[in-house]
Amino acid sequence: MVSSRNSRGRPPLESSRAVRRDRPPPSRGAQSRVIRIIGGSLRGRRFRFADIPDIRPTPDRVRETLFNWLGARVAGARCLDLFAGSGALGLEALSRGAATAVLVEQNAVAARALAALIAEWHLQGARVERADALHFLGRDPEPFDIVFLDPPFHAGLLSRSAELLERRGWLAPDALIYVECSAREELPPLPERWQLLKAKRAGEVGYHLLARTEGESRLHDT
């Protein structure tokens, strides 16, 4: 398994509404809640996400690095933004040519805001699912080429959601998985088939790109 040297074991399962405590408290000003699409057909468009304390969008510089890592794999891909929040990752993927993007968000206000934005921008292939992420993964699966996995920090959701993605058939054979977690901790145990390709840190956020392979995964220096 892709494992951590942290010996504390898996934290208790909590709701995906848990606050991402490792990131700074949000500013409540409207401008602080504005996100810019940084590449693709929607490049330069801005949108305001819901004013909900739990939502911590992936910063611009991290998104830019991530989509540089993904490169040509985004075009035509089926994408799953499992803990969508602001929707920045799923929307960025659509802008860069993804065929479909399913954005899963439990909070009703955030889900409605995403659905309204998708309608306003006339985005084809986008779908918002208002659901708890783990409950969503209990449904009949559909395979995805790229999965964005950014659960609330310290909520115990990363290993569990990764296990369900792998075990229940949500991943295409050569799927890529993007993972965010606290930079203060190493990655928790992840499925054996997930091979770490890239990893970086930005402030309190550690971000990683993994690939699903047929063989046993091994950690690589990045």
Image (cartoon, rainbow, N blue to C red):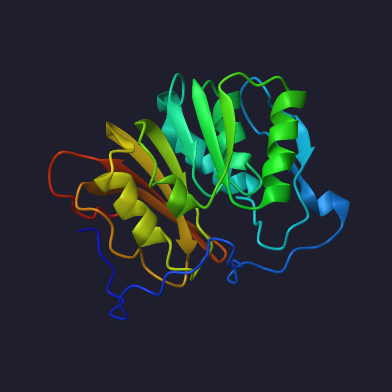
Query: Please, is residue 206 above or below residue 50 in the view?
Result: below
Res 70 visible: yes
Q: For this view, does 80 lie left or right of residue 8?
A: right
Residue nearer the viewer, 102 or 97: 102
Counting labels gives 0
What's the residue at 55%, 47% (across, down)?
A: 131
What's the residue at 35%, 36% (across, down)?
A: 141
Measured as percent of width and height from the top left, residue 27 is found at: 80, 63
Residue nearer the viewer, 137 or 189: 137
Image quadrant in which you'd find residue 20: bottom right
Image quadrant in which you'd find residue 72: top left
Res 222 visible: no
In the current view of this chain or complex, which residue is farthest to the bottom? 8
Measured as percent of width and height from the top left, residue 7 is found at: 28, 80
What's the residue at 61%, 23% (across, down)?
A: 40
In the rendered image, the quadrant that contains the N terminus is bottom left
What's the residue at 65%, 33% (across, down)?
A: 38
Measured as percent of width and height from the top left, residue 221 is found at: 28, 55
Residue nearer the viewer, 190 or 37: 190
Measured as percent of width and height from the top left, residue 189 is found at: 28, 63
Q: For this view, does 178 lie left or right of residue 222?
A: right
Query: Please, is residue 95 above or below residue 21 in the view?
Result: above
